[in-house]
Image (tube, rainbow, N blue to C red):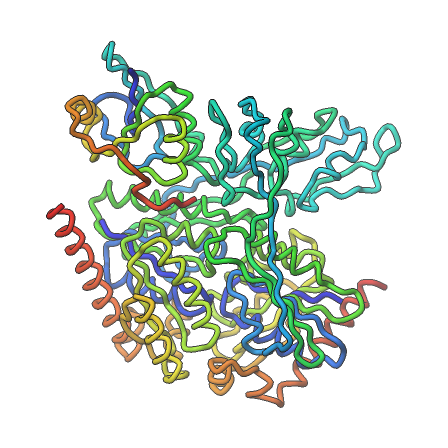
Amino acid sequence: MKIALTTSGENLTAPLESRFGRAPRFLLYDLATDTFELVDNSRNLNAAQGAGIQAAQNVVRAGAASLITGHCGPKAFRVLSESGIPVYLAESDTVAEVIEKFRNGSLPRQEQADVEGHW
Amino acid sequence: MRVAVASGKGGTGKTTVAVALALAATQEVQYLDCDVEEPNGQIFLNPKRICQEAVTVPVPALNAGLCNGCGECGSICQFNAIVALKTKPLLFPELCHGCGGCVKACPQKALYEQNKTIGQLTMGGCGHISYIQGRLAVGEAMSPPLIRAVKKYLRPDCLNIIDSPPGTSCPMISAVRGSDFTLLVTEPTPFGLHDLQLAVAAMRELEMPFGVVINRCDSGDRRVEDYCQSQQISVMASIPEQRSIAEAYSRGETLLDAAPAMRSIFEGLLEAVRLSVAGRAA
Amino acid sequence: MKEIVVISGKGGTGKTSLTAAFAALANGAVLADCDVDAADLHLILDPQVLAQNEFISGHEAIIDPAKCIGCGACLANCRFEAVRQTDILTASGERLPAIDPFACEGCGVCVRFCPVQAIDFPSRHCGAWYLSSTRFGPMVHARLGVAAENSGKLVSLVRREARRIATDEGRDLILVDGPPGIGCPVIASMTGASAVLIVTEPTLSGVHDMERVMKLGAHFRLPVHVCVNKWDINADMTGRIETKAIEAGAIVVGRIPFSSEVTQAQLAGKSLIEYSDGPVSNAVRKIWDSLCWHVDATETSSLERSATN
């Protein structure tokens, strides 16, 4: 199973990026093989609006089964829940620490958008 | 004739000037209040016999039974207002610009258009002035469609005064486009000058004729006048600062209520605009 | 990290003058000028630009006259009155259409449905943004191009950069000079802020516009504070505004008297605090103290709430 984590860095020691829509990239981690790849999200930085929606589509297309991020707005959340992808919220620890917490089941699952949307 | 009253900076006196012009005119006037985010003309003109009408934009709606999940709609949309997932598209009408692209692009004809209300028009009369106002619903993001709806009321047979939004981005442009003349209202301060320069750049890019009105002309320094002179921009009126005008304004009274002697300034201004437009047409 | 956004609803109430004064009092905050359509904060803060970046947003449609066959499909499809027919003729004798860049919304419909793919769709250069330093702290500001779509994207970018600087440099306060109105750019300037300060004036227009922008604050569940500038122009109205503000759940943080000092300070290129120690300066200090106290109090109580959860 692959999980996506928002990050501004390029490996497991990088911090988790707290915002979803305009995060520079996702780290897509394969829990079965313990390998990862990076998925670019930077075209969203140029989106006039709906960056969260575009980011959510990127997560869906990358084949992630779950998303872990700091905050997720209502439009992005809607796209992800309609696609069957649960969202988990985490603090800005390193990606490796967050993955550990996910494995331990200690990350809260988001029931609805936790921040108001914006452009 | 269509005269737009605009400015770079907010709070320079657009509505004050637009209202005074409307009141000083001796012919029939249509006052189009296009500052749709914060329209204030009605405070001063007190229009009677009010009627209202909702303004809508077309946004897509889905006939799910016809959708085969091809995703064409999502790929054409530039605004992320329609998102094509594996099953059916998700709609975000608040981001929709009403371009109709997704509806046209759908090979299954599964999308149709529905009207979404973004604001309202309010119309009324005040003597020789007909007042038409656009008011954007709070939380709606886009002004231009509502501004275009207000401007549908432009009439060729009278004086149309267009009270424009401040700034130089899309709302201001929507309001001033197509006008015969634009008055840029400013104040003689650093902020006033800076924002006037932005507005002048906009008018020059649009290749539209304009002149400057300096409000509270004795409250600052000469920099705006000097700038206009160096750029060969006509200063068509200068209105002195008077505390009594500010106090009247605060009560919703017009400039001409507070300073009736200034009527001649606005009569002169209208005449100057008329001559300029006629001169250009010749 | 706290972010205080100064807005007004109505233009010209004194947002920028007040934000500059707060910058002087905070002395070390990150400053963000989000009034990207008519930015003025730099006229008082005199920033030294350290980096300049292009702002690219959306697209625009441009017809290639060499490929166009004058069929008129673009004219028929455009919802924004952006296509007009010129007097130039195509090779087949039809009138060549042209797209008005000031009206083009960048929707791409004409591009997609042109039968001969004669329309290009390049990215649009919409302005520039700057990272600068001022005597009171780092500043992020921007300049939106003429007729550019003010979607709030540039505003979001300015805020994001300000947050990045605050994190990188360990600064705990961001001061945002917001835009007038209630549209996209205002929404973009205030979502997720710690506090909003509405600067209004005791006029019917000021009240009217304040009420509209307060609805926006309520919609985004932000702590809203209000101060009345030029209060003595109409003491009655000032009282009414303050009552309305409180009834709507906002906190009144002070009043500033009408004074030529505000313009004089601007003419001198100084913030109100630097210009003098008079009644205006004192009023601003009181407002700043009150605002900071309330912002801290809100943070403490929300921390306490999450600690008990």
Q: Nearer the viewer, residue C229 or B35?
A: B35
Q: Is residue B90 left or right of residue B111?
A: left
Question: Where in the figure is residue B64, as x and y percent of width and height?
Answer: 55, 30
Label tally: 0
Kindly tell me whether residue B94 is visible in this rendering: yes
Q: Residue at x 45, y 61 (%)?
A: C180
Q: Is residue C202 left or right of residue B51?
A: left
Q: Is residue C93 left or right of residue C96?
A: right
| Residue reaching furthest to the top | A33
Kindly tell me whether residue A8 is visible in this rendering: no
Q: Residue at x 81, y 67 (%)?
A: B279
Q: Residue at x 53, y 23 (%)?
A: B69
Q: Is residue A43 above or below residue C200?
A: above
Question: Where in the figure is residue B85, as x and y percent of width and height?
Answer: 47, 26
Q: Nearer the viewer, residue B206 or C277?
A: B206
Q: Residue at x 19, y 64 (%)?
A: C293
Question: Where in the figure is residue B58, as x and y percent of width and height?
Answer: 61, 45
Q: Nearer the viewer, residue B282 or C257?
A: C257
For the C terminus of chain A, which image quadrant? top left
The quarter of the picture where residue A111 lies is: top left
Question: Where in the figure is residue A35, as x and y percent of width and height?
Answer: 26, 12
Q: Nearer the viewer, residue B6 or C127?
A: B6
Q: Is residue C29 above or below residue C20?
A: above
